[in-house]
Amino acid sequence: MKTMNHYLIIALILLYPLVNRAQNVEVDVNLNIKHSVGGISDFGRERHITMHSSLYENAWEGELDKAERLFEDLDVQLGRDNGVASFLHQFSPEDENNRQHHDPDSLSVLLDFWQGEYQQRITDRGLLKYKNEQSRGTIMGTNPHPTYPTLSYFENGLNGSTWGRENGFTWIPQDIETSAAWMVQYLEEFFVETASQEGVVMPEYWEVINEPDFPLNTGQFMMSSWEDIIEYHNLVAQGIKQKLGNRAPKIGGMTWGLHDLFRGDGISRFATVNYVDGFYGNTAADEVAKAYARGQVDTPLFNRPRDTPWYQWDVIWKEFIDRAGDNMDFYSVHFYDWPQYQNQGGQRRSGGHVEATLEMLEWYDVFINGKNNRKPVIISEYGAVANSWDPMPHDTRFDWENLKPFSAMMMQFLERPDYIELSMPFHLLKAQFRDIDNNGDGIPEVVYHYKTLRDDDGDGVWEYSELVKWYELWDNVDGTRVDTKSSDPDIQVDSYIDGNEVYLILNNLQEQNTTINLNLFEDNDNNPTSVRIKHLYLEGVRNIVLDDTTTTNIPSSVTLRPEATMVLKYTLPNAVAINQTSVENKFYGEPVSNNQRVAINNGDNTFFVNNVTLPVDADKAEAMIKMTVTLFDAPQTENGFLSINKLTFNGVEVETPFDWRGETQNRSKWFGALEIPVPASLVQTNNTIVVDFQHVGEVNIVNLLTWDFSKKPGRSDQGNTDPDPIAVTGVNVSPNTIILNQGQTSTINATISPANATNKSVIWSTNNAAIATVDANGTITANANGNTIITVTTVDGGFTSSTTVTVNDNTPPTGDIIVIEAEDFVNTGGTFNDSFAGGPGLGVNKTPTNINYVNNGDWAEYTLNVTTPGTYDVEYLISTPSSGAQIQLFVDNTIASTTNVPNNGAWDNYTALTGGTINLTAGTHTIKIIASSATTWQWNLDKITLTTGSTFSGKTTASTSQYLKLYPNPSSGKIYIQGLGTNSNTTIQVYDTKGTKYPDIKLNDDHSIDVESLSRGIYFLKVISKRNQTTLKIIKN
């Protein structure tokens, strides 16, 4: 492996202190290592270098030269149209026999005419030659007006105009079924299959409705509900797929415009359903219309408080996925920065916000549908908007504010080539329909800002806007993606190779000049001979510059302007041999809660990423934790609000950065992704991440990414990226004595010293497997009467510690304690398939010490042999971070108790929970437990303990438990038993929750006992006198 730095550059570097170079950002590019995600490694120009326009727009009239330059010279792909369907809907005649519905026969005639009309238009404009290539990968759909039942006559084209009313265009859809029926017929009859046929080619993607969140129940007049919008997606998708079969495009949504998932609604909507009255008169017909409109609006989601945090996630996105996700082929998303320039406020979504939104959407989709059924995403609009700009004269600075996210956001999309199938920056061709001409003189007083072509001087000649510089910057970029890495998350980097040409793209998310050291690694002395450097940046307030230079002096570093983008095109003597690989994998973390967020606690916060496929060779691999969080928006400084005090990954402390992707987001909350590199050697199949945050907030998602390299990549820091190993200094096991009956199991714990030792691997062994065996997890199985020694040995250092195991026969302890280990079930089942999340499918999951992956409806059965009949108290050792969990217990198929399980904030923080009482006769019983509430993710269970203060052997022996009291309880030392008689000849037997008997405890003269020698936990004291006995529970601190 060789680094492409000239000898002169190396000599100069050696003359200066290394600290000067360390202040720069290091960018590494491994030219021979292909970087693939989900099997995709190409740039995909047709998927990303796109324009929000259609070949059939009237705006192309007289602009053939512009089309030739855009399509042929700059290789731009057209891609989106919402206008054709909306335009044709307003001309659809009403069915005279079925009012407020379209006439299917008349629509067929209309669509047939417009097929020929659109074909003729592109022919007359000289655009027919582009029909084939510009029909690939297109997105089409509709706007809310007039196709959706908005109940509005004000924005429905002909239906709201004087001419329309005079000529009979007065009907509008009244329900979603009517609109869906029109849509199905439209797609079936209007589109053709190939470019050689006359008409418009069927799009690849169909967005059901564009940005319905903006007009819904606002002054833009859309009287409807979230429920109907979601169901409309179902009706359209089901109808199209049923009618068109294999001809159907991919159907997707919800294409809504605002994505601040952690916030309230974000749109000012009417507060009560009676708002509809203000849009009608007082005639009898109006009263009928008002009543109908109120019925359309008045739904449960309308009445849900809109100012509560996470409304946009809980009500809009999550409800959509839950109710319509099964029928969607893709999800459609819009992202916009709200610039601060000439604007009050402003919010930055490029960077962290985009990452967090995509992480939440992807994680929940995988959680619901499984990793193999994850739905792709298309970004059908992205860029920058500001409402305050609308009445202002056009300022080229507005174009710059769009050019920044065009590159910044797209580079984030390029990181997910297997997930984001297509992205489209938002700017329209001429958008004259968006200009405002108040006095009707043909000269608009307000001109739309987001245009590719502009005629601001009104001379009739359309010139390119500054936005075309984005296409000039990205011109020719193509090829195979190769490995790159930046030492600063605010410097985005990507690289593609096409033959002997290497494209290196750098983007600056920071608001200052940044010097970047370029480290190109190539195995075959195939060094660049020239480089073309294009640099798009802002100079002054509104001067947008695209520098374009070519040189044979290959720079080892470049300076990137604030929020600028640079594309370097290296030319090499020979085609690059891309013969090594880097395979990127994402592993999805366990749910942090039922609603995708959990409050950050002071101190440790624990998260899990399980079922990870380990890298083939950890020495070559790289890994990263990616946490989606909501924190206070603040400067990214050491010990600041966005910093982490401590993070351990599988027990090893890992250094954490405090500089995250993107700058401040200019609002109270910072919604972003914390990207934390971790040593690949620490990655395990099941991983535990413990984080101590500097400040409060919420955690949403914790994922793990790995890069599996076929060769170790070149890195500017050639040192070992793993932390210095920390040696083991000792090991202790607990408990150090165990008493078991034949067939019982018990797990002992090994505590490694120090706690942050690098290699905590241990080996368990027994000196007599006939008496008891031990597995790799420290779980002991009792086989036969006798004593044996179980020993644990550390792999690092060979330190040992032992436990003495005594095995008795199968006769249970005399008295009143029965312990059912949760993992000892004989049957299980359920109705919720949790295999997508790593669970067993239907039923509970068995581990060596408990059961987990318990979903609503899951059950487990146990066979119980009872020797002592009586009334038993039920106690569960149980844990859950879910709210609303519940457990029911059945005895011989008869329900015996129902117990609500409180949320204790974790899956493995087992606490005792009283579960009522049950009556058991002597003999064999079937005990069944079931997760009985509607909460999807229920609880983890360690064991069930049954205790009674009475025994039955022909006659009843009275219990003294009601007269005995313990204090203090819990205790760490001495406990007093109140209620014993004087001169009481009493024996105190001790059992733990596994049923293991400990040595009897001496009762002191003051009726106290010493429990200092017991380990922390729950124990049962059997207090036995000559006349009676009872069982009491103690908690040892």
Image (cartoon, rainbow, N blue to C red):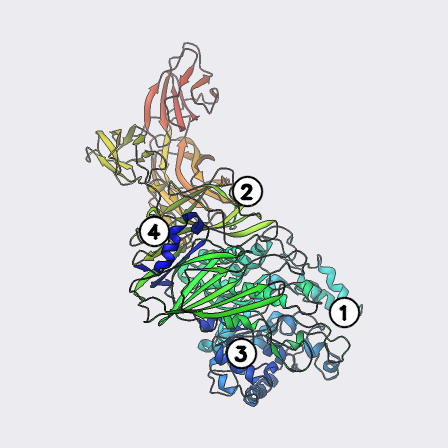
Tell me which label, 2 or 1, sits earlier in the chain: 1
Question: Which residue is tagged 4?
Answer: 718
| Amino acid identity at mark 4 | Gln
Question: Which residue is tagged 1?
Answer: 286
| Label number found at residue 187 | 3
Tell me which label, 1 or 3, sits earlier in the chain: 3
Tell me which label, 1 or 4, sits earlier in the chain: 1
| Marks 3 and 4, how far apart at CA | 58 Å
- Quadrant housing the C terminus: top left
- The answer to whether residue 589 is seen in the rendering is no
Tell me which label, 4 or 2, sits earlier in the chain: 2
| Marks 1 and 3, how far apart at CA | 34 Å
Q: Position of residue 952 (x, y in %)?
A: 38, 27
Tell me: residue 117, above or below residue 530: below
- The answer to whether residue 169 is seen in the rendering is yes
Tag 3's secondary structure?
helix
Seen as rendered, the residue at the extreme top is 983
Tag 2's secondary structure?
loop
| Marks 3 and 2, how far apart at CA | 51 Å
Q: Position of residue 546 (x, y in %)?
A: 53, 69
Give the number of the mark in front: 3 or 2: 2
| Amino acid identity at mark 2 | Val
